[in-house]
Amino acid sequence: MPQGALARRIDQGTGRAAADLVIRNARLLNTATGTLDRGDIAICGDVVVGTHDTYRGRREIDAAGRIVAPGFIDTHLHIESSLVLPGEFEQGVLPRGTTTAICDPHEIANVLGVPGIRYFLEASTSLAMTLRVNLSSCVPATELETSGARLEADDLLPLRAHPAALGLAEVMNFPGVLANDPALLAKLQAFADVHIDGHAPLLHGPALNGYLAAGIRTDHECTEFDEAREKLAKGMVVLMREGSIAKNVATLAPLLTDLTWPRIAFCTDDRNPLEIVEEGHVDAAIRIAIAAGVPPMAAYRAASLGAAMAFGLRDRGLVAPGYRADLVLLDDLGEVAVAEVICGGRLVEPELFTGRQHPTAVGYGSVRRATVSAEELAPGVPRGDTPVIGARPLALITDHLAWGALDQPPLKLAVLERHGRNGNIGRGWVAGFGPLRGAIASSIGHDSHNLIVAGDAEGDMAVAVNHLIGLQGGVVVVQDGRVLADLPLPVAGLMSDRSFSFVEARLRPLRTAAAACGCILGEPLLQLAFLPLPVIPHLKLTDRGYVAAGPDGLRLLPG
Amino acid sequence: MPQGALARRIDQGTGRAAADLVIRNARLLNTATGTLDRGDIAICGDVVVGTHDTYRGRREIDAAGRIVAPGFIDTHLHIESSLVLPGEFEQGVLPRGTTTAICDPHEIANVLGVPGIRYFLEASTSLAMTLRVNLSSCVPATELETSGARLEADDLLPLRAHPAALGLAEVMNFPGVLANDPALLAKLQAFADVHIDGHAPLLHGPALNGYLAAGIRTDHECTEFDEAREKLAKGMVVLMREGSIAKNVATLAPLLTDLTWPRIAFCTDDRNPLEIVEEGHVDAAIRIAIAAGVPPMAAYRAASLGAAMAFGLRDRGLVAPGYRADLVLLDDLGEVAVAEVICGGRLVEPELFTGRQHPTAVGYGSVRRATVSAEELAPGVPRGDTPVIGARPLALITDHLAWGALDQPPLKLAVLERHGRNGNIGRGWVAGFGPLRGAIASSIGHDSHNLIVAGDAEGDMAVAVNHLIGLQGGVVVVQDGRVLADLPLPVAGLMSDRSFSFVEARLRPLRTAAAACGCILGEPLLQLAFLPLPVIPHLKLTDRGYVAAGPDGLRLLPG
C-alpha cells in the first residue's frame, strides 16, 4: 500500500474528500454490537472508511433500506470439489456472498504434491475474492492407499512464507497424532506458531484432549450435537459444515447462540457446482441455521466475525472503518436473500471477472495407468461374512455391513491406482446405491484420487474406467457398454478447465443418467468419490483393499 | 519446542502418562461457552492438556471447589508507571492474576529511544509472566515539548522481528493522523499487517472514521459512555481502563454485556504500586465492572478471551487443551477473590521469582541539566486572563481556566528540560491541588519526562528540582527548604532498581507528606506527572510553555 493510499483513506474517512463509493439508505448489520445501525457506508479503494454518518461519493448506490452484512467466510473447503479452477469457482460463490475462502488444496496435493499447492497459492493472486490456503498436512492421508505424492514437514515449510498461506490444513490423521507419529509431529511443530486446522470425527474424551494438546484448534467434522458441544467446551472452534454430502448445520444449530458465536463458523468442505447454483454456498449454511432456530444475528456474526477471529483474519468480519469492504446487501435477513455483493470495494458483476490473467493450471496427463479388462475388476465370490460398505445418503460416514445380512445384492466396487506407481486394484462391494444397472466411475476418489468405479457388471465397469483413462480424468455413467453422460476433468483428474456454467450444465445429465440407471442416491458421483476415504469411519475401499476405521485406528482387512 | 515436548503433551492429554500437574475439584470458568464446568484440569509443562475428564498427576492440587478462570490480560500499560523494573512488576501483578501484559515502553522511549524499547523486549525473556511489547509510535508525542529521543518508522522496523514485539503502540498523535503527517503515516504503513493500537480521547464522528480508516483498531481512552458506544459500533475494541488516575470502568460498564464482550478488554495504562497492593490490578477492573452491573461471565471473558482475540494472542484466553496454562483460582466470582495463580503451569509463589538473571537496566544518569535558582522558576505577574491549568481529581483531562476566575490562588508550576538539549523552562500555574505549602516535584512528566515541579514558593521548588537532579531522577516533597520524603528513580528518571516492596514502602510517606503540606489530591505526584501531557485536553504545560489542546489540534500559547 503506497502512502498515498493511506492518505486517501484518511481524507475520505473524515469526509473532506468524496469517497470512492458510498452506500446510502443501508441498515448496517453490526457484528461488533449485534445491532442493525443506520448511516451511510463510505468506501475508499478496497476498504470501508466511514460508517454511522453522512457521506458524499464519486459513485453512490442506493441500498433502498437493504441490510448490509460483512462478506461471508468459508472457513474450510477444497476448491477441487467445485470441479472448476479458482477463477471460475469465485464466479459461482461471490454472487452468493462468499468473499473469503480458506482452502486446503489437499486433493491436488495428493495427486501432484507441492506443485499442486503452489498452483492454489499463485491462483489466489489473480482473484477478486480473498483465497487463503492452509497447507495440506496429510498427504497421503494414510499409508493404506497409494497416492501420487508424499509431503513431509520440509516440503511444506518453504510454502509458509507465501502471502496467501495461512497455516497447516486439517490434521485428519488423528490416529497418527495420538500415536506420536514422528513425521506428523514434525509438521505440527513446524506450524506451532500459526493456525493448525483439525479434523477429528467422533473423537471424544481424553483422546480428544490428547489431539488438542498438540495445538490443533478447529474441527469441521462434527456430525452429532453432543460431539460438537464437547469440542466447543474444550476450546475448539466448531466449523459447522454444509457440504453437498455432509450436511451438519441443522443438527448442530442449537449450539450456535448469542453466547457462543465467537467460537463458531461455517464451512462447506466439499460442495459441487450444481448445489452452489441451486442452494447457494455459505449463504445456504446461514439460511439452514436460521431455519433451525439460530438467532439470525448469531448466524451472521459466526459467518463473518467469528470466522475472522478464529483464523486471525484481522482485516475483516465487520462493516467498519479500516476493515475490508466485503459487503453483502440483503433483501431479507432470515432468508439470506442476497441482492448484491461488494468485494474489496467493487460491485460483483460480470465485468469484475473479465480480462484477468490467471496462472496456468497444472496437472494435465495425471491418469497414468493401462486400460483394464472386465475380468480384472471382478471381486471374488462373496460369502455371508464378506464385508460390504453401506453408503448412507448425504453422509461421509459409512456402515460396515456383511453380504449375508443384506436384503438386496450390493454393487461391485473397484479402486484402481492411477498415479503410475503400482497398478493396484482394490475390489469390494457397496450397498445403498439402489438397483443400479450399468456403472458409474470417477477419477475423484478421496483422498488419493485413484479411479473408483461401481456397477452391477464388470463389462460396463471396465468401459467406464477406460473412458476415464482416455479423458485423463473425469466422471462418467455407462450402461450396456455405452457412455450415457460424462464430464472431463483433465486438471489432475479433479477439475475442469472450462467455465463454471459449462460444468454445471454437464453435471445435470450425469445426475439424470445415474438415476435412469436405477441409482437412488441424490449425489451418486460425490458419494462414490468418498468411498475410498479411510479417515472417515467405518468401512472404505482403497487400491490396497478394504480399510476398517475405528477408534483404535485404521486397519487393512485381509482379502 | 522440541518434538519430545509435543509427544509428552499428547501422552499426558490422552491420560496414558501421568500429567505434570493436575487440579482437582475445580469449576472451570469456560470462556468458550460461558459456563462453569466440572472435571480435572491436567497440565503438561506450560500447557493445559486435559479438561472435562479425570486425570492423575505427578503433582496434584485440590482446588476445593474453587473456580478456575483463564489468566487475566492487561491489554495496555506502561510498566514504567509501576515505578519498578519488569522483574519486580510481575511480582506485584502475577499474584493478582495478571499473567499477560501488553506494554508500550513509551516513557523510557521518550528518554532513551531505541535502547529503552530494546530493554523491555529483552526483559520479557526472563519473566514468568508473558510480556508483549507494542512499539512506541509517538516519540516525541508532539513537537511542542523537548524529548530525549525521536523515533521514526526506520527506527522501529528493526525491532518488529523480536518475538516479544506485537505491533505499533498507541497512536496518540491523532491530529497528526488526521493531518496526514508523513512520518506518522510511514509508521502506520510499516505496521499495517500487524496490530496498531489506538488512543483517541473524545474523537468522534467523521474525524474518528478518518482515524480508523488508517487501520487503528483499539482505544483505551474512552472516558464517556457515549464515546465508548460509538467506538465499539465503529469496530474498535474498547479497552476499558482502570488506572490510578483514569478510572473509567464504572462509567463504561453498561457497554460490557454477554453480547459485546468479544470486542471489549481491560487495561490499566498507568497504575502505581500502592494501588496495585491496595486495590489490585486487572482483578480490580473486573471487580469494579461486576459491581457496576456487568454480568460476571462477560467480565471474565473480556479479561481473557476477548483480550486474546483482539491482540491475536492465539495460545491463551481459555482453560482448554492446547492453551497456555495461565490459571486464576478464585474463591469468589463476583469479588474476584484470587486464591492462587498458576502461570505457564507453575504455581505463583516466592520461589518462582528467585535465582533469575534479568537483563541489566539501561538509562542511568539520564537527568542532564544544571541546578536551578529560585528566580529561574518564577512565573510572570499574573493578569486576570492568565491561563491556569485546572487539575481534576482522578482524571487526565484538565480544564483551561483563567487566573481572574479563581476563588483561591493557584500553585506555581514549572517544567524543566532535562535531556541535555536546550535547558528550557516552561512556567505557569495549576489549580486543584489545594492550599499546598511547599513543593512537590517529579522526573516523571508525561510524555517527554522533563522535570516538573509545583509549589507555592520558588525557593522550595528549586530545592525540590535540585534534589531530583542530585538523585538522577525521582519524586520528592519539600517544605521550608527541607526534603520531607523522596523516592529515587535512577533508571531513566522513571523507575527504581529496588524491589516492589521497597518502592511501595517509600510511596506511603510521600503521599502523607504531600497531604501534610496541604495537598488535597489523593495521588498528587501522579497527577503532577500528567500535567505536561499535551495529547490529553485541555491545557497542559511543557518545557516550551502552555499548550492548549482542542479538536483542531494542539497549539503553543504565546508566553
Image: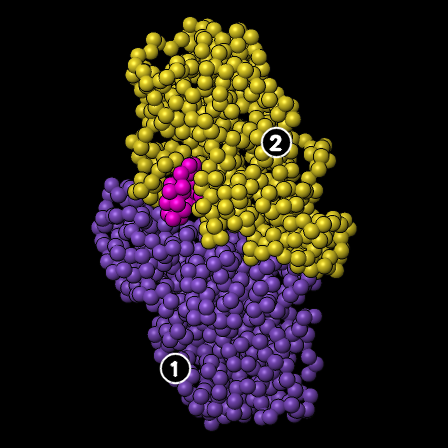
Chain colours: A purple, B yellow
Relative horizontal placement of residue B18, taking residue A466 as reference (left or right): right
Q: Residue at x 38, y 55 (%)?
A: A35
The residue closer to the viewer here, B294 or A68, is B294
The quarter in which the N terminus of chain A is drawn is: top left
- Residue B277 got which mark? 2
Relative horizontal placement of residue A191, taking residue B356 as reference (left or right): left
Relative horizontal placement of residue B423, taking residue B320 as reference (left or right): left
Mark 1 Cα-neighbour bin, 10 Å: few <14, some 14–19, many ≥20: few
Mark 2 Cα-neighbour bin, 10 Å: few <14, some 14–19, many ≥20: some
The residue closer to the viewer here, B355 or B286, is B286
x%, y% of residue A49? Answer: 32, 47
Host chain of mark 2? B
Label 2 SS: helix
Q: Which residues are magenta?
A: B214-239
Host chain of mark 1? A
Q: Residue at x 62, y 25 (%)?
A: B504
Residue B10 in sight here: no
